[in-house]
Image (spheres, coloured by chain):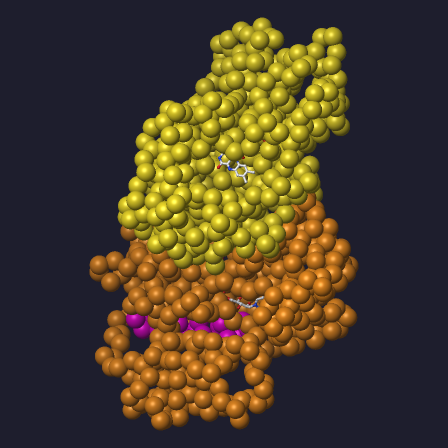
Amino acid sequence: MENFDIIIIGGGPAGMAAAVSAKKAGAENIVILERDKVLGGILNQCIHGGFGLHTFGEELTGPEYAERYADMVRDMDIPYELETMVLDVAPKPDGCKAVTVISPTRGVCELSAKAVVLAMGCRERPRGALGIAGFRPKGVYTAGTAQKLVNLEGVHIGREVVILGSGDIGLIMARRMTLEGAHVAAVAELMPYSSGLKRNIVQCLDDYGIPLLLSHTVIDIKGKDKLEGVVIAQVDENRVPIKETAKLYPCDTLLLSCGLIPENELTSAAGIRIDRRTNGAMVNESLETSIEGVFSCGNVLHVHDLVDFVSEESARAGENAAKYALGAKREKCESFDIETGNGVRYTVPVSISPGNADELTHIRFRVGDVYKNVSVVVKSGETELVRRKSRILVPSEMVDLLIKKDKLQGISENIKVYLEEA
Amino acid sequence: MIDVAIIGAGAVGCAAAMELSKYKLSVCVIDRESDVGEGTTKANSAIVHAGFDAVPGTLKARFNVRGSEMMEELSKRLDFAYKRNGAMVLCFDKNDEGKLTELKERADKNGVKGVSIISGDRARELEPSLTDEVTAALLAESSAIVCPFEMTIAFAENAYANGVEFKLSTLVTGVEKTDAGFVVKTDDGDIEAKVVINAAGVYADTVHSFVSDKPLAITPRKGEYILMDRSAGGTVSRTIFQLPTKMGKGILVTPTVHGNLLAGPTAENIDDKENTATTTDGLASVKAKGALSVKNIPWGSMITSFTGLRAVGDRGDFIIEESDVPGFIDAAGIESPGLTSAPAIGEYLCELAGRRLDMQINTDYIAARSGVIHLSALDDEHKNALIKKDPAYGRIVCRCESITEGEIRDAINRPLGATTLDGVKRRTRAGMGRCQGGFCSPTVIKLLSEKLGIAMRDVKKNGK
Ligand SMILES: Cc1cc2nc3c(=O)[nH]c(=O)nc-3n(C[C@H](O)[C@H](O)[C@H](O)COP(=O)(O)OP(=O)(O)OC[C@H]3O[C@@H](n4cnc5c(N)ncnc54)[C@H](O)[C@@H]3O)c2cc1C
Ligand SMILES: Cc1cc2nc3c(=O)[nH]c(=O)nc-3n(C[C@H](O)[C@H](O)[C@H](O)COP(=O)(O)OP(=O)(O)OC[C@H]3O[C@@H](n4cnc5c(N)ncnc54)[C@H](O)[C@@H]3O)c2cc1C
C-alpha cells in the first residue's frame, strides 16, 4: 500500500490552496486526488469575472483564478492525480487513514495517509428535492448544469428562460443566457430577500432589465416532453402560494438556483460528525473534524459566496494538516463550544480550544434573515471577545470575524455569537 | 407479411415478444416512445405482489400467482434486479382486523404460501419504524421487489437477441383487417401481420377500437409517488401496505431494489392519458398517509417525485383474450398487479397467438441475457481486471451512484441500447442519485451525441 503524509480529496480552489500551504509548512509527501479531468473544480465553468479581488488584488475569471493556484501546485511539484475518485475514507487502528480510490490507471486500490483534507466542494439542489409539482420535461436544469453546458460544451439550451431561486449562479446565468441571445422573463425567489450577492443583482439583473420577483415561487411545470411554461405565484408570509396570483410564463427553459449542498457522503460514511445546519463537518478552530487528522475546508465545509474566502480557509486547513502529519501534538487544554444566539444560523468552527488557536481565529457564519443596524457580539460568560457594528447583514453574505489569540486566553465558559440591536 | 405485430413495448408487450421468440416466428414490437418501458411500466410501485390481494378465480389472481412464481428464476436468467423482501399489510383499527382475515383467506384460495396474521407488537418487532397505531398486520413472505425498467429491458433484449424486431419512435395510427391478416398503420409506414397483439397500456381502448366495434374503455387512474435518497432506504426492510382507512385507499412505503425509499401512490381517476404531472395536493397526501404507517419518514431526503397511470379496464379484471376480430388479441386493462403478471401474461398471449400460427420451436433460442455490468457489484479483483481491460471502467461519471464511463458506453453500444438520457439512466442508474443528473448529464449527453452522430442539443431526455 502506498503511504502519504497528506491526501487531499478534491482539486478545486480549496484542495489546491490546502496543498500549497501544507507544502509550505513542511509536508513533503502530499497528493491531490481529483475526479475530474482537470484541476480547478467548479471554477472552470465560471467564465465570468469577479474572482480574486481579495487574494490577488485584481479581478480574474474563474478559470484564471484556478490557473493561478494550479501553477503554484505545479511549480511546487505537488503531485496530483486526475480522474481519480475517492470512494471511501476510514480511520485505521494505527491512526492513519485508509483512502480507497478508483481511477483508469490505478483501478480500485487503497492508499494510506497520516492526514486527510476533505475539499470535495458542493452540488446543487436538484428539482426533485424541491418538490415542485408538475411534469418532468426536458428544459429544466440546475443553473450550474446549464452553466456547464453553455460555457464548457457550447450548447445552446433555450430561448425563453425563467429562473427559480436567486442564488448567485442563477443570477450569473440570467446574464449569461441574455448574452447568448435568450430572453429571461423573470427570476422568482421564494424568500422576501435574494440569496445572491447585491453586486450580482445589480450587474446581472438590473443592468438587463430582468425582474426579480421576491416572495414568488414556481407552483406548476407545463409540457410533457419539452418544457412549455411554468406557473409562478406569490407566496404569503408562511411561504404558502396564493393561488389567485398564479400566472403562466411560457418558456422553454427553467433554471434552478435553489441552494447548494456540501458533498459530504464520504464524510458521513467515515463516521465524522455533521452539522445539520451547514450539512458540513463539525470542525474545531483548526478546521479539524471529529476524527483526528481529518480536516475540512471550502464548500464541502460550508457554502461560501466568494472563492477568496475558500482559499484563505483552505490554506489554514492545509497548514494544520501539515502540522499534524509532521507529528505536532495538540495542546491538552480545554475546548469551548460556540453557541449561536439571535439571528446567527450557524458558525464555523463549532468549538475553540484557546491553547491550540492561531494568532487569529476566524469565526464565520450567516444570518437567518435581513438585519439592519445591528451589532455582532461574541461573548464568553461576561467577557466580550468581539463587538462589530453593521449597517446591514443579509443571508447571502457570509460574515467573517477575527479573534486575537490573547483575547481567548483565560476564558472559562462557552462562547456565544449573536446579534444585538445597535 | 410478418407473423405477429405487438403494439406497445411495455412490460406486457416485451414479455409477449420474449415468449414468441422461442418459436420460429417473425415478430415486431412497435412503440411510440424512443425506448421500451416508457409507459406505465416506468412509473409504478415495482412490487412483485405475493397474490393475496387478487380475488380468487380472476385473471388477475391467476397471472399474479404464476408471474410471482416465475420472477426469481427470470431475474437470474435475464440478469435484472429482484429481491424477495416480504410485505406487510397494516391494520390501524381493531374493528378492521376482519379485513386481514379476508386477505389471508384469499391468499389460501389463490395458493399463496407464507402468509400469516401477526400482532401489532410483532409487526413492530420485525419493522421497528412502524407506528404505535398499528394493531395487527398481514405478513406475506413471498412478496418481492424488482426493477421494472431493467426487467422490461431484459425481456426486450432477450427477444431482440432471438430475432424480434423493435420499431420504436413509431406511433400506430390505425389497424385494418384484411383477408390475410392485418395492416398496422403507423406514422412511419405500414406493417402487415397475421396476428396483432394490443398491449398499448392506457391506449389499449383506442387501439382496440381500430378494428373492433365492441366497446372497451380504459380509464387512466393517476398514482403519485415520492422517492427518497438511499440514505433513507433502510427505514423499512419490507414493503408496507395499509388497509384502507378513513383517509381512503392506503399507500405503501417500500425500499426499492436499489436501496432507495419509495412512498405512494395516490389514486385519482382522470381524463387525460398524457397527464403524468405530479400535484401539490397529491404529494401532500402521500406524506400524510405515509406517516400513518411509518414513524419519521425522512421526507427531507426526497430526490424526486413522479406519477404513473393505471390502465383501469371496464370489467374489474384484466382483459386478455382474442377479440371479436379473429387474430386480434387484446391485453388491456393491465393495472396492478400487471408488472408481476407480465411474464405469465406473455406466456398466455403466446399461447393465444399460437392458435392462429404455425408454431415451430426456435432451436437456436438463446435463453440467457446479461445486463450492463455494474462495476460496484463486483469484488475488487474483478473490478481491477475489468478496468485493466477497459480503463473507461475506472472513470466515474455519475458521482452519486458511482457509475463509470464503461457502464454508460455499454448501455449505449449494446444491441437495442439507450438513445436518450433516460435510456442511459434506466440501464445504468447514472443520474438516478441524489443530484439527479446535475453533474453527469453533460457527459452522458456528450457520449450519446458521439454515438448517435447528432449535436449535443439534439440529444433527448426521453420521448419521440
Ligand atoms: C456553480 C458555482 C458558481 C459559482 N460562482 C461564483 C462566482 O461567481 N464568484 C465567486 O467568488 N464564487 C463563486 N462560486 C463559489 C466559489 O467558486 C466556490 O466557493 C469555490 O469554487 C469552492 O471551492 P471548493 O474547492 O470548495 O469546491 P469545488 O470547486 O467544487 O472543488 C471540489 C473538487 O473536489 C472534487 N471532488 C469531490 N469529491 C471528490 C472525490 N470523492 N474524489 C475526488 N475528487 C472529488 C470535485 O471534482 C471538485 O473538483 C460558485 C460556486 C458554484 C458551485
Ligand atoms: C401507480 C401504479 C402502481 C403500480 N404498482 C404495481 C406493482 O407494485 N406491482 C405490479 O405488479 N404492478 C403494478 N402496477 C401495474 C403495472 O405498472 C402495469 O400493469 C404494467 O406496467 C403495464 O404494462 P403494459 O405493458 O401493459 O403497459 P405500458 O407500460 O403502459 O405499455 C404500453 C405501451 O404502449 C405504447 N403505446 C400506446 N399507444 C400506442 C400507439 N398508438 N402506438 C405505439 N405505441 C403505443 C406506449 O407508449 C407504452 O409504452 C402499477 C401501476 C400503477 C400506475
Q: Main secondary structure of the magenta part?
A: helix
Q: Is residue A28 above or below residue B166?
A: below
Q: Colour of chain B?
A: yellow
State the residue at coordinates (56%, 38%).
Answer: B42
Res B9 seen here = no
State the residue at coordinates (37%, 72%).
Answer: A283
Q: Magenta region: which residues?
A: A306-325
Q: Is residue B370 above or below residue B430?
A: above
Residue A313 is inside the magenta segment:
yes
Q: Quadrant of the N terminus of chain B?
A: top right
Residue B377 is inside the magenta segment:
no
State the residue at coordinates (47%, 34%).
Answer: B372
Quadrant in which residue A257 is drawn: bottom right
Q: Position of residue A92 (x, y in %)?
A: 25, 58
The answer to whether B363 appears left or right of A326 in the picture is right
Q: Is residue B211 above or below residue A56?
A: above
Res A368 seen here = yes
The answer to whether A12 appears left or right of A136 in the picture is left
Quadrant in which residue A274 is drawn: bottom left
Q: How many marks?
A: 0
Q: Nearer the viewer, residue B443 or A340?
A: A340
Q: Colour of chain A?
A: orange
Q: Position of residue B401 (x, y in %)?
A: 46, 47
